[in-house]
């Protein structure tokens, strides 16, 4: 690793030049095939410069992980937990540095960046103690002098592919549980945040993790990510966990399926929020603003379809639109008070700008706020940054959208929502369940019966009542259904099932061969059922 002069963004700091982490050693620092991460608030600022990994580097990382697996899985789980505890302590010590690096690299407001790093700290704290709770069971046998028991065993080498919108929290959700269960890791972080990943990888090393237990191969999804997927077919990876688009998730599911593996897939969402006519309107507006435009709408749990009861729709929008117009957009490195920063990368900017064409295909939708790229000399009120340098956009809002519209069915991944007006709860829940996604959801109502119906009838994997569609805690399962995932979950005790396999053991101390179902003791009743009549 080295820091070099940053000619395009001197005020942000130097450029990190790094390499892959394979078997405890830095590899490829002098490679000619490289990629860079740019500060999206000031795209001349080169945050990091890393080698492009391919099949060769992935194979080396898998070999290192396989070699380290035997020793790591035999390390007592409480000892593995102590190392996880050290990882959490080191993250806490470096929280402010890590938060500011994350803010610079992906443009997330500093307050949110600190929260993301805290999520990793919480995850480490939770799973440190799970090293003493990887419980199996003892089961009574039907035979004498025989004991039955079950144990959790690690699955082996885990290939992990993570996205750029949460480049610190989401990797912690995958890597830390995988490690506590005794697995080894080959991690492909997002090409949008290699510096953040490099800092995380060095924390693992500093915490005393043995060489080869965590290996990091940097690069683009098309090249490095594909090499990870191909490694499944080559027998180099025993488990894959992926956070990203539904399209890529499908491809991973196909490869994993033919290799009889169960992947962990955390994919996209078109998340609904229902606001009923009895709701606290001010509270619901606040929740909807955050759900829709927090992080620039770049959360997989961001609000997509805002479902309003017709009785309160106009009142709601009369409060919502002025708030949306007054949001503070800008460069998060030098302005802590902003609502959201730039879009993470140019590809997300292009998708956001293109979504207006899709929305205008609707026969009923009305554009209330036509979000656009912020231009120099035409900045919105309160804007703080350089519009000519950053990937900044204003919020978008379409009213009178139909759930059947393409816009209501498609994840945009940016600060935009569609309003769907409904007559009653039945129509509202039908709209909420009316897409092929099923990640997050929300309802605002003070009606206890409607709350209960919502909890029972919504098809999403996560739901909030009188709160936003976003937010996660380290001890609660995170994940979705349908196009949002394959039913696997991140976080909490539930994720342990993704990184372990059950091992059943029977121990026979009878001194002879006992056969289940054949040598069991019979229980004799006083009578017998007469079944002769059944054959008449």
Image: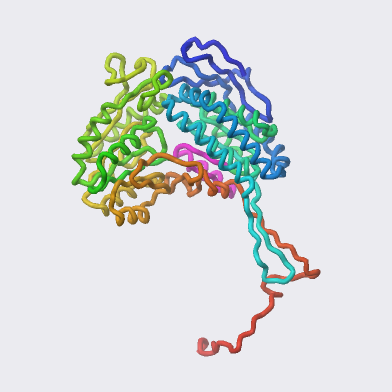
- Is residue 221 visible in this depiction of the protein? no
Is 3 magenta? The answer is no
Going by the picture, which residue comes out furthest to the right? 511
Q: Position of residue 529 (x, y in %)?
A: 55, 87
Which sits in the foreground, 15 or 337?
Answer: 337
Residue located 54% across and 39% down the image: 123
Q: Indicate how the structure is coloured in the image.
A: rainbow
Q: Quadrant of residue 75?
A: top right
Residue located 32% across and 27% down the image: 353
Left or right side of 224 for 459: left
Residue located 54% across and 33% down the image: 225
Q: Quadrant of residue 268?
A: top left
Compared with 56, 73 (above or below) is below
Q: Position of residue 360 (x, y in %)?
A: 25, 34
Residue located 51% across and 45% down the image: 475
Q: Position of residue 315 (x, y in %)?
A: 19, 39
Which sits in the foreground, 486 or 295?
Answer: 295
Left or right side of 225 for 379: left
Is 241 magenta? The answer is yes
Magenta span of residues: 240-266
Left or right side of 27 for 160: left
Q: Position of residue 76 (x, y in %)?
A: 70, 44
- Is residue 90 visible in this depiction of the protein? yes
- State which quarter of the image contains the N terminus: top right
Q: Report the label total.
A: 0
Left or right side of 311 for 439: right
């Amino acid at each position: 690793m080295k820091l070099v002069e940053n000619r395009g963004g001197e005020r942000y700091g130097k450029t990190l030049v790094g390499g892959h982490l394979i078997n405890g050693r830095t590899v490829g620092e002098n490679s000619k095939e490289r990629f860079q991460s740019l500060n999206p608030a000031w795209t001349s600022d080169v945050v990091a410069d890393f080698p492009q990994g391919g099949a060769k580097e992935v194979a080396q990382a898998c070999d290192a992980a396989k070699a380290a697996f035997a020793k790591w899985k035999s390390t007592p789980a409480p000892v593995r937990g102590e190392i996880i505890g050290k990882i959490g302590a080191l993250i806490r010590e470096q929280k402010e540095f890590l938060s500011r690096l994350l803010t610079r690299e992906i443009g997330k407001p500093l307050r949110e960046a600190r929260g993301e790093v805290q999520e990793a700290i919480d995850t480490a704290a939770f799973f440190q103690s799970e090293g003493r709770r990887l419980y199996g069971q003892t089961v009574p046998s039907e035979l004498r002098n025989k004991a039955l028991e079950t144990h959790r065993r690690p699955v082996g080498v885990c290939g992990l592919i993570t996205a750029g919108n949460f480049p610190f929290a989401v990797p912690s959700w995958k890597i830390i549980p995988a490690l506590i269960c005794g697995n080894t890791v080959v991690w492909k972080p997002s090409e949008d945040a290699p510096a953040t990943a490099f800092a995380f990888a060095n924390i693992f090393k500093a915490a005393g993790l043995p060489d080869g237990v965590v290996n990091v191969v940097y690069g683009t999804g098309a090249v490095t990510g594909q090499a990870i997927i191909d490694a499944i077919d080559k027998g180099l990876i025993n488990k894959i966990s992926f956070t990203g688009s539904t399209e890529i998730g499908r491809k991973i599911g196909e490869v994993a399926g033919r290799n009889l593996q169960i992947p962990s897939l955390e994919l996209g969402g078109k998340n609904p929020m229902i606001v009923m006519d009895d709701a606290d309107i001010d509270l619901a507006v606040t929740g909807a603003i955050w759900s829709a435009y927090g992080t620039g709408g770049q959360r997989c749990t961001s609000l997509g379809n805002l479902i309003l009861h017709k009785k309160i729709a106009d009142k709601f929008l009369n409060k919502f639109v002025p708030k949306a117009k007054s949001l503070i957009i800008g460069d998060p490195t030098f302005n802590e008070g902003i609502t959201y920063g730039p879009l993470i990368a140019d590809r997300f900017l292009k998708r956001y700008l293109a979504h207006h064409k899709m929305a205008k295909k609707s026969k009923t939708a009305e554009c209330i706020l036509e979000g656009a790229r912020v231009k120099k000399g035409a900045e919105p009120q309160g804007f703080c940054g350089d519009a000519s340098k950053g990937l900044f956009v204003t919020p978008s809002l379409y009213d009178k959208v139909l759930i059947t519209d393409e816009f209501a069915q498609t994840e945009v991944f940016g600060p935009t929502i569609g309003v769907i007006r409904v007559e009653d709860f039945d129509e509202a829940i039908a709209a909420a369940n009316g897409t092929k996604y099923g990640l997050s959801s929300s309802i605002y109502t003070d009606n206890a019966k409607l709350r209960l119906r919502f909890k029972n009838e919504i098809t999403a994997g996560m739901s909030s009542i009188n709160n936003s569609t976003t937010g996660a805690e380290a001890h609660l399962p995170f994940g979705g259904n349908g196009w949002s995932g394959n039913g696997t979950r991140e976080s909490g005790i539930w994720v342990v099932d993704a990184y372990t396999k059950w091992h059943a053991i029977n121990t026979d101390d009878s001194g002879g061969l006992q056969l289940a179902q054949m040598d069991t003791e019979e229980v004799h009743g006083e009578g017998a059922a007469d079944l002769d009549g059944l054959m008449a």
